[in-house]
Amino acid sequence: MKRREFLLGSGAAAGALGLGGYSLAAGSGAAQELTIQSASFALRNQVTTGMVSLSPDAPPPVLYGRQGEVMRLPVRNTLPDYTAMHWHGMRIANEMDGVPYLTQMPMAEGELFPYEFTPPDAGTYWYHPHCMTMEQMAHGLTGVMVIAEPEDPGFDSEQVINLRDFRLDEDGAFLPAYTARGATRAGTFGNVQTANWLDTPTYEHIAGGLVRLRVVNTDTTRIYKLHLQAGAARIIAWDGHPVEIDIAMPRADEPLLVGPGQRVDFAVVMPNDEGEAVELMAKLPGQPHRAMARLRAVGASVSRNLQELKPLPVNPAARPDLANAELHEFVFGWTPEGTVPNNGFCGSLGYNFWSINRKPWPGDAAQDVGPLATLQLGKSYVLRLRNESPNLHPIHLHGLAFVPIKSNQRQLPPLMTDTMLLLKDEVVEIALVADNPGDWAFHCHVIEHQKTGLTGFIRVV
């Protein structure tokens, strides 16, 4: 596959544990209680209070599990606001999906929900609240999940990079998480860009070693344009699933678009000379290219190369039968501002600006709301996604995996995914097997769009 086809399609070292060594091995089967709590952290030179994390003074940890092994993650809420935890990209049982009113009741202060599931897929995933979503995510509650393959794929180390914006004033205090103007357009952008809550952190990895670099966009709004300043590297996974085709690496002049909710895994060969670095670069609007994070080579070179790596084992996600697939159409666009959505305990922004099939979501707690579509368990489907707006929309489907097959604007590589970034006026067809029963949320992952009407659910029976 040519470079442009892919780029347009997707639009034992000190850093090995990801977020400064703060991680939780959650795949042993033993319950690992997670506590949603208020936090403080120096995002700039001053300490910012009023943050939300699973730690009082650190980012949400990387949660480590293993494919096919049970994860028990009871979540306790200590905030005065309600919450619920969603495990983004995980094809798990519907009752564990963490969507308030659709799969569970939201958790009040002091309550605990016993999440338990067995990941069927290896790869890079993440977690975030699906109740009071805008406020809690904007204040920090977004964390990465790493589900390891049963067999070691052969890297010397790995590095997790969690890309996040924050909206702060000059004193380090939070600005409002959203604006009405932003909600009607591309979203309200942050003014402090971070990787793992830090400004261009440096992580050390053995010189000449093979590093698995897991990059996750957990922002509420921003679409990152990314490339690596590196020697030998390649993309090995996209949105959790192994890449099974040869694709070109992004460059400064043709960066990789990574929307909110999306993930990309790189295999990187570290420089042979101590002190040299690999940089994860981003192009932000109106700014020059900047390094989001660095991997610094240390020690004597171990002289590894990419040819030593075996292909990652393919996840057991079913491939759709296109010859017998049924078509459903979805239109994403604006809506006249109307009634305030009824989100119950889960926080409304106070208005509707967006819609699916020209009807805005009436709210998480609205009564007598039906599915956007009902799919029969085990059957293949093609979903035609039509963006009737000039804004980009990362459309996320819970509980299922799909393959992009056609666009009216670009050639799409057939990469298994759970989040499709729709470009301006784009029409994309995706294909899936409805192999996971339940009511599955289907929404834009620009949270202001989601919370102002661009959401719904698909039922699999």
Image: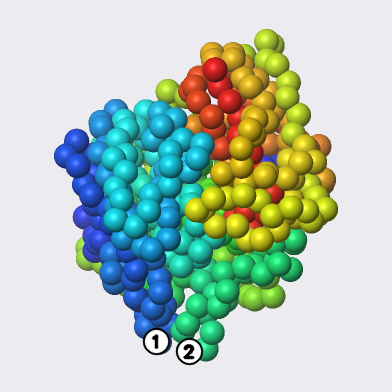
Q: Quadrant of residue 95?
A: top left
Residue 87 percent coordinates (x, y)? 42, 43
Left or right relative to 321: residue 301:
left
> Could you tell which of marks 2 and 1 lies nearer the N-terminus?
1
**Residue at the image point whose x is 39% and y is 39% from the top:** 123
The three-letter amino acid code for the residue at tag 2 is Asp
The residue sitting at the front extreme is 367
Q: Give me the residue at 61% from left, 30% from top.
A: 458
Q: Please, what is the three-letter code of the amino acid marked with disc 1?
A: Gln
Q: Are the residues flagged by discs 2 and 1 in contact, CB closer than 8 Å?
A: yes
- The C terminus lies in which quarter of the figure? top right
* The label number, if any, that marks residue 171 in the structure image: 2
Name the residue furthest bottom.
Answer: 171
Q: Residue furthest top?
A: 324
Where residue 178 sits in the image (x, y, percent)? Answer: 62, 68
Label number found at residue 366? none
Query: Residue at the location (27% across, 43% down)?
Result: 73
From this view, report whether residue 358 is shown above or below residue 258: above
Q: Secondary structure at mark 2?
A: loop
What residue would you read off at disc 1?
A: 46
Give the quadrant of residue 93.
top left
